Amino acid sequence: MGSDLPAKIGRNLVRGTVGTAAGRMVEAVIGLVMVPFILGHLGSELYGLWALLYAMISYLNLADMGLSAGLNRHFTAALTSGNQREQEEVLTTALLLMGGFALLVGIAGWPIIPLVLRFFPDVAQYGSEAVWTFRALVITFALSYLANYGRSLLVSTHHAARMAALQIVISLGNAAVIVFVLLMGWGLIGLALGTTAFTVVRLLVYFIAGIHAVDRWRFRPHRFSRSVLNKLWSFGMWVQLTRLSELLNTHFGRIFVGRVMGMSSVTHFDLGMKAAQSSGLLSHMVVYVIEPAAAALHELKDRERFRRLLFDAGRFMGLSAFGMAAFVIAVAPELLVLWLEDIPDPNVVSALRLLSIALVLEAVTLPMRLVARGAGRPQWSAQYGLLHAGLNVLLSIGGYMQWGFIGILIGHVIASWVGYGLQTGVTLKGLRQPVGRFFLSTWAAPLAVTIPAAVLLRWALHAWGPSLEQTGRLEILPWVLGCLMVYSVATVLLAHGSRVMRFGELRQLLRRLRG
């Protein structure tokens, strides 16, 4: 029975990571579908205000000091050891701290909100509507800390697949609330209050599911432990540094645009960012299985299979991510018409194309970062993620001073390629893998395949495709689907013929991940 335990844990990890990725994908798709509906009911200005306030409030994710990540790790360790006292200490300490942070943020956030909003000149015209929307979002994020407690318990007890199913149901429920609120004509404040009310439901669902997943869950305040507190924070702070860099890279652009350009420009940036982020969802879902596979190979000290996993996964992700980004760039106007049901503003098209170039490296380098985490080296992502975020801030400001809105987008592109390039080089050296060969096989070779195919596709659409001014969504949809099928087949055949990734190598990669 004992020999079956590692295999059982491995199967749970794979099911959990796939389930979590699937849940995230469904959640992102629902969010993408909801954007045109929200935009149509709020208008460009109020939608931009909503995107700006949500971007600012996202930084409250940092206020839990990484406790949810620490709870994942240390409660799993306590379960593995079978130490009942340690389990109670971890559960109690984490709950008291996360509940305290939720209360602190919920109370302290209210009086400082008007002061924060003064930083944005265009927000003043919305008066109390902006203030009360912001306050409702503060309460929403404060409640999310306690929801994260339940989510962490589900992950720690190997019920991540159950959590993913709950996440899908909750996402659908939240979408239904948004539709109801906007159809009733309650506007921006109604949208914020509806989101807050549904967060209470989400908190209860995750919390109850989490404590039911733990055998003999007990809340014992006298089990609060300072040593457990130090363990939770010491691990969580590395995760928080990574999260800070992700927040800066994702939301700084919206906040900076809102400060210097106004709400309509925030809408343009937000639409381009959401569409660009959605382009790599399918490949992300597949590649999340790499982390448990890398951890297992690292523990077995199988360096050759570890190296093959890194390179084969990197080539697969390079081909799929660069390929999808190139397709999105080529057919950006047509995709936006399908999504938004209208001819998009040129700034939205530019944002989608340039942010696709910037974000593609996040997907391409994901296998390498997951392999590093599986090998027990999360600090590499944290340190160079902060460097990337710092470059993003500086280059976005400098780009705006030189070229305005387009300059901010160009700053994102340069920061992404420099930051991820440095991070890749350092991580590969730490893993003792050949840097030049990795860049050649996962960056240069896929680009050589996907760029010509995308250029030919754009030329064909320009020569024979439908006119956006004279056709609607139903006429454009067959063209886009047909282009996607032809482009995908052409890219796969080119990759196989040029030996970037042969069919047999892809089958071996999938077999290695299953094993």
Image (spheres, rainbow, N blue to C red):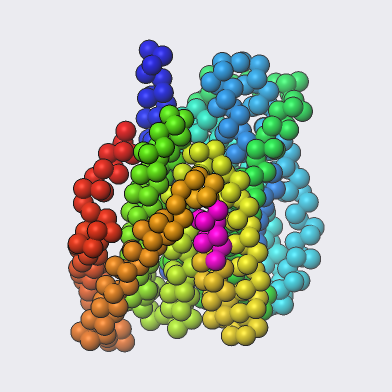
Q: Nearer the viewer, residue 495 or 141?
A: 495
Task: Decide if residue 183 is in sight here.
Answer: no
Viewport quadrant of the N terminus:
top left
Residue 30 appears at what percent x and percent y? 41, 56
Q: Quadrant of residue 466?
A: bottom left
Task: Describe residue 189's horizontal placement relative to residue 34 as left or right.
Answer: right
What is the span of residues highlighted in magenta in the rendered image?
A: 418-426
In this rendering, is residue 222 above or below 419? above
- Residue at point 59% right, 85% down? 403
Main SS category, magenta section:
helix
Task: Describe residue 265's horizontal placement relative to residue 124 as left or right.
Answer: left
Q: Quadrant of residue 411?
A: bottom right
In this rendering, is residue 396 above or below 361? below
Residue 324 appears at what percent x and percent y? 34, 64
Q: Does the magenta segment cover residue 238?
A: no
Task: Describe residue 233's horizontal placement relative to residue 205 as left or right.
Answer: right
- Residue at point 52% right, 71% down? 413
Viewport quadrant of the C terminus:
top left
In this rendering, is residue 238 above or below 345? above
- Residue at point 41% right, 23% down? 6
In this rendering, is residue 3 above or below 15? above
Q: Nearer the viewer, residue 235 or 381?
A: 381
Residue 99 appears at what percent x and percent y? 70, 37
